[in-house]
Image (cartoon, rainbow, N blue to C red):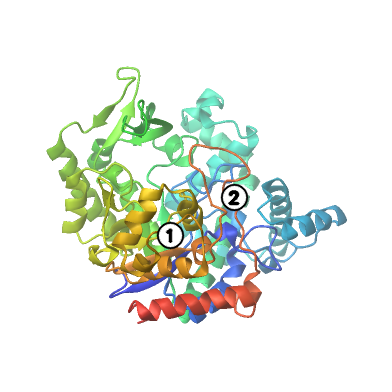
Amino acid sequence: MSLPQGRTSGVLLPLFSFRSGTDAGIGDFGGFGGIFEWMKQAKQQLLMILPLLPTAPGDPSPYSTRSAFGFNPLYIDLNQLPGATDFTPEERASLKLARAAPTVQYERVFPLKEAALARAFARFEAQRDFAAFDAFVAEQKDWLDTFALFAALSDANQHRPWWEWPAPLANRDAKALAEANAQHATRIRYHAWLQWVADAQWKKVRAQAKQAGVLLCGDEPFIIGKDSADAWAYPHLLRTEGRLGVPPDDFSADGQDWGLPWFDFEAMERDGYRWLRTRARSAAAAFDVRRVDHAIGYFRQYVRDAQTPRGRFIPSQEHQQQALGEKHFRLLSEGGAGIMAEDLGVMTPFVRRTLDMLQLPGYRVMRWAREDGVYANPRQYPAVSLVTTGTHDTETLREWWQTAQQWEREAVCRTFPELHRFFPPGAGWSDDLHQAMLAAAENASSNLCIIPWQDLYGEETRVNLPGTIGPHNWTYRMRVPVEQLTTDGTTRAGAELLARLTVGGGRAG
């Protein structure tokens, strides 16, 4: 479907952040019902949940993708699987601690879910009713055969990256692959089964969302990890002899080297963009709306390799970059789901012009929407845009306000009509200031408005601090279980506040 029509309001809450009385210490597909009930109370129409793709074993980041297709088995609801919740006494003790923890304790969650899913698979194999599973495997053959084999080989090689596997397997020798398919048949079947279970549970979530009148927004990472099924199977498309990153800018004299493969778009074009089109169709089938990450990457990529260790743009000329980006976003739009483009950071004018021409909304993060220290009035943002108080990579609204420079607070209060009465401002945080900031977002002229969960509740715990690794990243959990969101005093009050501001901003269609 296309983007929602008219003025729409929604919330950003990663799936791993859901809390439920029946989860395994991390949000899962069984927690959406309570979220949808709360959203109805809050008059919200759009839920953004970050990527759901399979990730690297032991890596909590939803952006550490090991496939452009499928779902992360970590999000499977164990309660829907016979045999999965037959926990041992030791597992029950660990489960109790994981559920009660204020943040996601991956060191407990990973082994708990792995053991539970293995039990459920053994139960499935014993009951011998495979018709629906076999149909799914046949339907998803284009990507699932490769991914399941890759995942099984990764297990067999102690999760070493694929380029460290025996050479015949790393180079995809036909004889070696045939032998591997026979040798690891059970493990291959297990990984395919995980995808079947996740897909079936996600279809239930989609049905729940439709009934609740909620649109689900997925997040589509630009590139896929180097140690991924796609980089292994399509080395001519995801090139690993160079490293993707960004060029030097005002914030970094050397730029950023992400160590990720880069897309060979010329090779993709020669193949009729088959892989990219399949990816777009898969994402469109899973979500109502897609957030396309790192939009500028579809125009140009900054690549470092042996020949250019400082990096170069591919393609090199601006007119080539503009034509490439327009072609790619037209292609990505073929899938059906509406697209919003993540266009934050250093962005060239022609990228914004192209997105505007294609009527694809980009981001307006209110604290960043300024030039030379002059803030834009949110009521003058383009209608075809997404306004937000922050993203999963920013500090929360409250933390930003309390640590911002005084001139920033003053400039915001001069520019945002809802904050005029707070001039001259201090660094103090209050309920009135909080509500005024949220109202500024809901009253903005952008058709789409997204409020991060932490900003709605004035919290200070962020989701991710880019460029760092540690327990502070990807572990945020909501404080109240989803079953209690509409009855707990704090979360109910937040829903009522957001409903009032949404109505006031003309977004409660």
Residue type for callout 2 = His
What's the residue at 69%, 54% (across, down)?
A: 113
Instruction: Using the rendered view, name the quadrant where residue 116 is placed.
Output: bottom right
Mark 1 lies on a secondary structure that is strand
Residue 112 at what x, y percent from top left? Answer: 73, 52
Left/right of residue 481 with respect to residue 327 in the rendered view: right
Left/right of residue 396 with respect to residue 489 in the rendered view: left
What's the residue at 35%, 17% (across, down)?
A: 306
Residue corresponding to mark 1: 218
Mark 2 lies on a secondary structure that is helix
What's the residue at 55%, 31% (across, down)?
A: 161
Between marks 2 and 1, how big is the CA–CA gap?
22 Å
- Quadrant in the picture for the C terminus: bottom left
What's the residue at 30%, 48% (across, down)?
A: 295
- Who is closer to the viewer here, 18 or 110? 18
Mark 2 is surrounded, within 10 Å at the Cα level, by few (under 14), some (14 to 19) or many (20 or more) other residues, namely many
Asked whether the viewer can see residue 339, the reply is no
- Who is closer to the viewer here, 373 or 226? 373
Contact flag, marks 2 and 1 (Cβ < 8 Å)? no
Examine the rendered structure and indicate whether residue 311 appears above or below residue 318: above
Residue corresponding to mark 2: 191
Residue type for callout 1 = Gly
Whichever of callouts 2 and 1 sits on the residue coming sooner in the sequence is: 2
Residue 421 at what x, y percent from top left? Answer: 37, 68
- Quadrant in the picture for the N terminus: bottom left
Examine the rendered structure and indicate whether residue 477 appears above or below residue 61: below
